[in-house]
Image: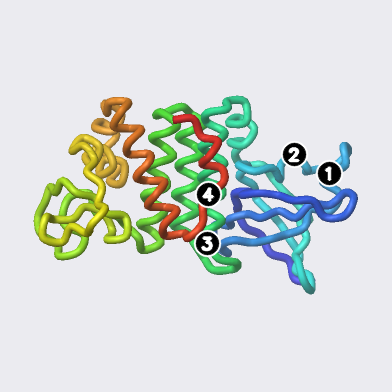
């Protein structure tokens, strides 16, 4: 049977039979894949620990009729092992992994999503920024890659130059007084500046943000994400804010 090889980030796993496990991973070239790890739940498994969420591995698989099977897994980065020792960082990582699975499709190349997720996990593992900020930056950028970039300055409906005081999730972000729908939120200007900084990667502004603006921004980000996904991200409920 044909073999293939690709670098991948393990997104999640679930049990199959008595000793096997199905591994959902985001591959650098192939996109989201589902493969079977034979016997990985046995204590003597050669690569069971390498196929845990958050691990970056070099996978070799052979194609099967229904599911492909892992024949080799070489560890490239142990982000999952590192992050699992810190509850705050781990819950943020789980939310990112779940979001990556939701925003990608089976066997559809998603290189930008792969690189973004890899960079976010690296930032969490190396403690470069507050985990909550890394999570929100990842969520906003992942949405932007998928075509749902929010506007935090100009009006999302008519394009009128901002800044604007109102924010409406369904409209796509900031809205001017003329376009403002009923029920629009009125976040603090500092919150919108923080979210714009996270989306653009301006960490000097993001790191200096006040805690109350971080919390408000996290709420807007979560609501914006879940509106577009049309379902909640379960892991987000566990994130401490």
Q: Element under label 2? A: helix
Please name which of the two marks, 2 or 4, marks the residue nearer to the observer.
4
Q: How many angstroms separate mark 3 from mark 2 (CA)?
A: 24 Å
Instruction: Identify which residue, 132 or 113, lies in the foreground.
Output: 132
The answer to whether residue 231 is left or right of residue 54 is left
Please name which of the two marks, 1 or 2, marks the residue nearer to the observer.
1
Q: Residues within 10 Å of mark 2 (few under 14, many from 20)?
A: some
Q: Are marks 4 and 1 in contact (CB under 8 Å)?
A: no
Which mark is first along the chain, 4 or 2?
Answer: 2
Please name which of the two marks, 3 or 2, marks the residue nearer to the observer.
3
Give the residue pinned by disc 3: 104
The answer to whether residue 213 is left or right of residue 98 is left
Q: How many angstroms separate mark 1 from mark 2 (CA)?
A: 9 Å
In the rendered image, residue 27, in percent from the top left (x then y), is placed at 58, 57
Q: How many angstroms separate mark 3 from mark 4 (CA)?
A: 14 Å
Q: Give the position of the C terminus as an image quadrant.
A: top left
Which mark is first along the chain, 4 or 3?
Answer: 3
In the rendered image, residue 222, in percent from the top left (x then y), is placed at 41, 46
Picture disc at residue 49? 2
Which mark is first along the chain, 3 or 1?
Answer: 1
């Amino acid at each position: 049977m044909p073999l293939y090889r690709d670098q991948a980030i393990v997104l999640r796993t679930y049990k199959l039979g008595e000793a096997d496990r199905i591994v959902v991973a985001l591959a650098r070239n192939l996109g989201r894949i589902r493969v079977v790890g034979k016997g990985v739940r046995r204590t003597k498994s050669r690569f069971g620990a390498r196929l845990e969420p958050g691990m970056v591995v070099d996978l070799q698989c052979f194609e099967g009729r229904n599911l492909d099977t892992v024949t080799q897994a070489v560890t490239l980065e142990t982000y999952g092992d590192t992050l699992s020792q810190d509850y705050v960082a781990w819950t943020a990582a789980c939310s990112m992994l779940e979001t990556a699975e939701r925003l990608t499709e089976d066997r559809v190349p998603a290189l930008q999503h792969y690189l973004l997720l890899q960079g976010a996990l690296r930032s969490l593992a190396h403690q470069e920024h507050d985990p909550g900020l890394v999570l929100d930056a990842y969520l906003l950028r992942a949405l932007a890659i998928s075509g749902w970039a929010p506007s935090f300055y100009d009006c999302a409906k008519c394009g009128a130059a901002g800044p604007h005081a109102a924010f409406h999730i369904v409209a796509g972000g900031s809205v001017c007084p003329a376009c403002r729908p009923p029920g629009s939120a009125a976040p603090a200007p500092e919150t919108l500046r923080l979210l714009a900084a996270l989306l653009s990667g301006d960490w000097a502004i993001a790191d200096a943000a006040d805690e109350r603006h971080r919390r408000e921004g996290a709420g807007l980000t979560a609501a914006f994400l879940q509106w577009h996904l049309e379902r909640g991200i379960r892991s987000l409920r566990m994130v401490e804010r």
